[in-house]
Amino acid sequence: MERAERFGRADRIIKVGFWVNALLMIMKLLAGYYGGSEAVFADGIESACDFIAILTTMIALSVGRKPYDERHPYGHGKAESLSAIFVSLVIFGTGGWILYKSVTTISNSEYSSPQMMAVGAAFLTIITKEWLYRFSMKGGSAIESPALLAVAKDHRKDAITSVATLIGVTGAFFGIRIMDPLAAGLTAFFIFHIGWETLKSASHDLMDGQPDEGLLATMTAIAQGVEGVEHVHEIRGRRSGQYLIIDLKLEMDPEMTVKESHAIATEVKKRIFARYLNVGDVMIHINPHEEEHEDLIRL
């Protein structure tokens, strides 16, 4: 998948989420207000918070697609991870707000009597948000975009929230009015979990955490399958937005010419590029095989 195609796909996914979320927000605010459901109206406010997350992601995708330059030799991909951090904070804030409203409503015994339109709005939100989650997750996983994956998890958070909203508003509709705020309060803890998972993943990328070991093992096998490579001395990787940057240390015949070793290293790079379309760069260092050598590092 070429660079332009990757970013074009990301744009399409985020725009679908943006406009669908806009329609859901309007629907829930109206249904909550006129249908007498605090939970559904709160769900609509939550969708408004999602606008902040989606707009942030759109900005991050725009920044992240810029090619590398003199000041950013590794590209601008980490803007996506920064965006994912912000989305996680929005998720935490939303969960905290829902929990606060739930506790306040229960402690003050200020229960509402929702109408059927509020129940229908909650049900429709579940179906729509779960579809958005699967749609965004599929696309985000295909191009390995931290920002899109964070937005996908935010959609799943909304679906979970709306399940509790549906249970609560249905119970309240049939007379058990405390169920409306109680279900919303319990859901806040699921929201906190999703926020934590999003924050942890984005922080791992920002701290240049190592990619999946199975992925690196496969790349090692590809490199060692190239004639002239005696051994892969070390392999490391880090994420920059939708791309991985790989560092390889290869052992070769010490009597080999620079030209020959360069040609072999280029072949290794070509094969990794061909297998993994999300690899942005492979930086290769060559060591003499079966000879003592010192790898200087100060980290």
Image: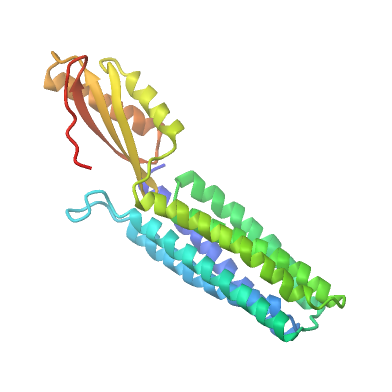
Q: Indicate the position of residue 60 as horizontal and vertical percent values.
A: 38, 62
What colour scheme governs how the chains and residues are painted in the rendered image of this protein? Answer: rainbow
Q: In the image shown, does 238 or 30 lie closer to the viewer?
A: 238
**Quadrant holding the N terminus:** top left
**Left or right of 203 in this view: 73:** left
Q: In the image shown, does 125 or 237 lie closer to the viewer?
A: 237
Q: Indicate the position of residue 53 as horizontal and vertical percent values.
A: 48, 67
Vertical relation: 134 (above or below) 22: above
Vertical relation: 256 (above or below) 61: above
Occupied quadrant, residue 47: bottom right
**Left or right of 150 in this view: 1:** left
Vertical relation: 212 (above or below) 157: above
Q: Residue at x 81, y 71 (%)?
A: 170
Give the total number of marks visible in the rendering.
Answer: 0
Q: Residue at x 47, y 66 (%)?
A: 89
- The reply to whether residue 39 is in sight is yes
Q: In the image shown, does 102 or 116 lie closer to the viewer?
A: 102
- The reply to whether residue 241 is in sight is no
Vertical relation: 38 (above or below) 161: below
Residue at the right extreme?
174
Occupied quadrant, residue 248: top left
**Left or right of 102 in this view: 84:** left
**Quadrant holding the C terminus:** top left
Q: Indicate the position of residue 14 as horizontal and vertical percent values.
A: 49, 60
Q: Residue at x 67, y 77 (%)?
A: 103
Q: In the image shown, does 200 or 1 lie closer to the viewer?
A: 200
Q: Indicate the position of residue 92 as horizontal and vertical percent values.
A: 52, 67
